[in-house]
Amino acid sequence: MLKLTATLAALGLFVGSALAAPPTVLTTTRIAAGLSSPVYATASPGDETRIFIVEQAGRIKILKNGLINATAFLDIATPKVLSGGERGLLGLAFHPSYATNGFFFVYYTRKSDGALVVERYTRLTDDTADANSGVVVFGPVAHPTNTNHNGGCIQFGPDGYLYIGTGDGGGGGDSPCNAQKGTTYLGKIVRIDADNWTVPPATNPFVSPTDGILDLIWATGVRNPWRWSFDRETGDLHLADVGQNAVEEINFVPAGTGSGANFGWKIMEGNNCFGTGNCPVGTPACNDPVFTDPIHTYQHNAAGGFSITGGYVYRGCAIPDLKGTYFFADYVSNKIWSYKVVGGAVTALTVRTTELDPPGTLAITSVSSFGEDACGEILICDHNGEVFKIVPATTPPAGVDLGNGEVAFNGQSPKLSVCGLLDTGNTADFSLKTAPPNKTLVLFVGLSQNPIPLFGGTFVPALPAPLIVPLGTGPTGEFTFPIPGGGGPIDLYVQGLIDDVGASDDVTLTNAVKLQFQS
């Protein structure tokens, strides 16, 4: 892979800069509008072409090629979902093997009685699911008294199990002390085996038949864990929990820990003592070291907010200096923050509200959720009907996909992509995906484009190309390597030619990409 880097040096580009890039200025761009109360946005594993958007009423829409599909991916609004206030279709998680088994999971409040249900569904086509394929994998958990505090977030953890966050049953102050009782699933983080949900995971902390605690409970003491996530790189859990009267909190659980944790509610609200009424005998007292203290809190006031919306750690490639940064927001105050965790403590706490205000007359209000696309770029759901994406404000993206690829003999479309920033001090990831394995690959690098018909397709770099780089597709048909930025401004046009016996003319063209080097 060093050959391509060497070609860039041959063109006079500044490669391997020792200078540090200044922090990237951020903004947001709106990617979807006209939605009905979106509460989550995500992608299925490895799918860079679709964003799945959950509408609270009971539908999942697909954003593809910049447009919302006319037909919903899943619509269970009428038969199954009780929606309104804090109720509705609240969560979505794709099975890690979704590409092959087509399974995904949803969390909703049941139409007949408001009970909490997690159900598995099956994909029918790439853009539609079988609405009749639902199988209950968790619940129903009775939630009859109050309409609020339903939880709703579900995520697959790094261990492959499905984690489920439930609210404490609602009202105010958790009057029954559900979050501290091991005999109810309310106010808990639950963990199930999504492939064998009738059997509790053997490593769950309370699987003993004599401990009097429900076997699927993984952690206790949460009030309304509306939105939380696992860091896709480290496996760390960032667990935001909506507060009661005074404090919003985020709990940090390093990967491989947290089993059996007690996050303190209702004995504690954040770092404050709250109450003990109706709690079972033996419940720890306020400030007992058995509780897991939050890593970050903020107060109910104008400087903070009143209802936290947890987010994600940035692990995308478009903004390299942002990696490891956790984003979160407040639904009421519309504030957005970020921080990094270093040595188990919050550092670089930054107010991002103004920076992430979209251009023009658009505005982000009522942040109902954050999400990630397949590449790890961060999405923001505005409950008023829009979805935004965090992007660099001033530096152009490293690469632009120019299309014009072909389908290989194996039925897949080899794709080149470039993700990152190519200014001085930054790098971009240059990748090949879904190519036929163990084939000869030649990259043509041009200083301009002049699309012409060639090998049954369209060849984009102007010929003769000044640089030709022989590579290979490798045993998986995929590779990724970094390209240092700087040396511009200059644009390069790159397209690959694969020796592919059986394809048209026994060769297959990849798509073409434009590399945009900056100074």
Image: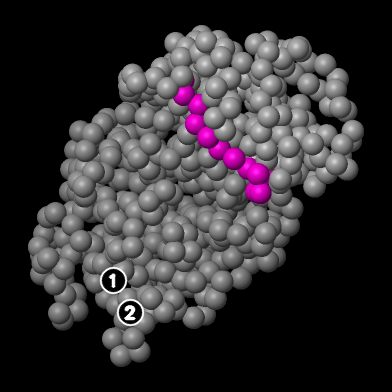
Disc 1 from disc 2: Cα separation: 8 Å
Residue 519, image x, y percentages: 44, 11
Of residue 403 and residue 220, the one placed in the foreground of this image is: 403
Q: Residue 390's quadrant in the figure?
A: top left
Q: Residue furthest bottom?
A: 210
Going 16% across and 75% down the picture, which residue do you hit? 283
The three-letter amino acid code for the residue at tag 2 is: Phe
Q: Is residue 308 visible?
A: yes
Q: Is residue 227 visible?
A: no
**Mark 2: secondary structure:** loop
Going 75% across and 18% down the picture, which residue do you hit? 460
| Image position of 322 with respect to 411: above or below | above
Q: Residue 65's quadrant in the figure?
A: top right
Going 39% across and 19% down the picture, which residue do you hit? 17
Position of residue 253 in the picture relative to residue 416 (left or right): left
Marks 1 and 2, the one that precedes in the sequence: 2
How many neighbours does mark 1 have within 10 angstroms: few (below 14), some (14-19), or many (20 or more)?
Answer: some
| Image position of 42 with respect to 275: above or below | above
Q: Which residues are magenta?
A: 474-485
**Mark 1: secondary structure:** loop
Residue 294, image x, y percentages: 21, 53
The three-letter amino acid code for the residue at tag 1 is: Gly
The residue labelled by disc 2 is 206
Q: Is residue 483 magenta?
A: yes
Of residue 343 and residue 197, the one placed in the foreground of this image is: 343
Callout 1–callout 2 Cβ contact below 8 Å: yes
| Image position of 168 with respect to 47: above or below | below
Going 82% across and 16% down the picture, which residue do you hit? 452
The residue labelled by disc 1 is 260
